[in-house]
Image (cartoon, coloured by chain):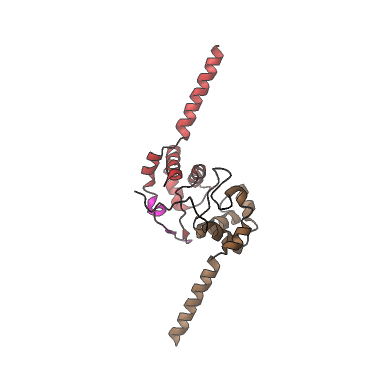
Chain colours: A brown, B red
């Protein structure tokens, strides 16, 4: 009985962990409309080469980047302003949108 | 005439100097990147504390990569491992690695 209870608690905590981390890519597409001006709709066509490609980047890295821009831990005049008013859910959604796009980025697992 | 020649010479020299400094050599960069593969060459590899995926850097824009490595080097961008790595890199190393990564297939 106790085992079942523990299993339920574990399952629930796994589920809530997921719910927090997984953004909604569809909602993210809307929230990212403003980002497209510099990063491109799919995150691959940047306005300037000094801006990073985001399409297909890992979602949790994008979340970390936006959190750091929001807190000011990472400094960039444009991005600090853009991230300042984003809620956690917006950040998760935007990250999910870009992560779901086809990508020019490579993970270099085949580096020789 | 003399001043025209002098001006041309100065322009040529400055163009050369700029080139030598700015142009990255992808072949050299590839050699330098070997160390980086410990994290950036493993698909889905996680950074610890806090836990998040180490970014994909192959195919990224060259100018962005140069800016990112320089920001780690100066400490503007805070990440202990990346700061230590970037501090060991010269301007030329950074240009070379960025050239390699931007063209990486």
Whether the magenta-drawn stretch holds residue B42 is answered as: yes
Residues shaded magenta: B35-50
Foreground residue, A9 or A71? A9
Q: Residue at x 60, y 64 (%)?
A: A89
Foreground residue, A30 or B101? A30
The furthest residue to the left: A112
Q: What x and y, as percent, mark residue B75? A: 51, 47
Q: Quadrant of residue A32?
A: bottom right
B76 lies above or below A16: above
B87 lies above or below B38: above
Query: How many numbered tags mark residues here?
Result: 0
Q: What x and y, as percent, mark residue A78? A: 62, 48
Q: Quadrant of the N terminus of chain A?
A: bottom left
Direction from residue A107 to residue A64 in the image, left or right: right
Foreground residue, A47 or B18? A47
The furthest residue to the front: A102
Q: What x and y, as percent, mark residue B97? A: 42, 43
The furthest residue to the top: B1
Q: Residue at x 51, y 70 (%)?
A: A17
B59 lies above or below A59: above
Direction from residue B86 to residue A46 in the image, left or right: right
Q: What x and y, as percent, mark residue B21? A: 46, 33
Q: Quadrant of residue A7?
A: bottom left
**Main secondary structure along the magenta-highlighted residues:** loop
Whether the magenta-drawn stretch holds residue B81 is answered as: no
The furthest residue to the bottom: A1
């Amino acid at each position: 009985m106790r085992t079942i209870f523990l299993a339920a608690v574990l399952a629930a905590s796994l589920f809530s962990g997921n719910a927090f981390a997984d953004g909604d890519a569809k909602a993210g597409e809307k929230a990212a409309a403003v980002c497209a001006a510099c990063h491109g709709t799919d995150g691959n066509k940047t306005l300037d080469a000094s801006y990073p490609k985001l399409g297909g980047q890992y979602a949790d890295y994008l979340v970390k980047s936006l959190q750091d821009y929001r807190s000011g831990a990472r400094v960039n005049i444009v991005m600090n302003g853009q991230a300042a008013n984003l809620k956690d859910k917006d950040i998760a959604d935007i990250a999910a949108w870009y992560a779901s796009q086809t990508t020019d980025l490579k993970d270099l697992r085949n580096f020789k | 005439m003399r001043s025209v020649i002098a001006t041309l010479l100065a322009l040529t020299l400055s163009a050369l100097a700029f080139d030598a400094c700015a142009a990255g050599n992808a072949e050299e960069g590839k050699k330098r990147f070997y160390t980086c593969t410990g994290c950036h060459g493993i698909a889905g590899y996680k950074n610890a504390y806090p836990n998040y995926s180490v970014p994909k850097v192959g195919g990224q824009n060259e100018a962005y990569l140069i800016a990112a490595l320089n920001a780690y080097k100066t400490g503007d961008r805070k990440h202990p491992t990346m700061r230590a790595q970037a501090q060991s890199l010269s301007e030329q190393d950074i240009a070379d690695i960025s050239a390699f990564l931007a063209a990486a297939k």
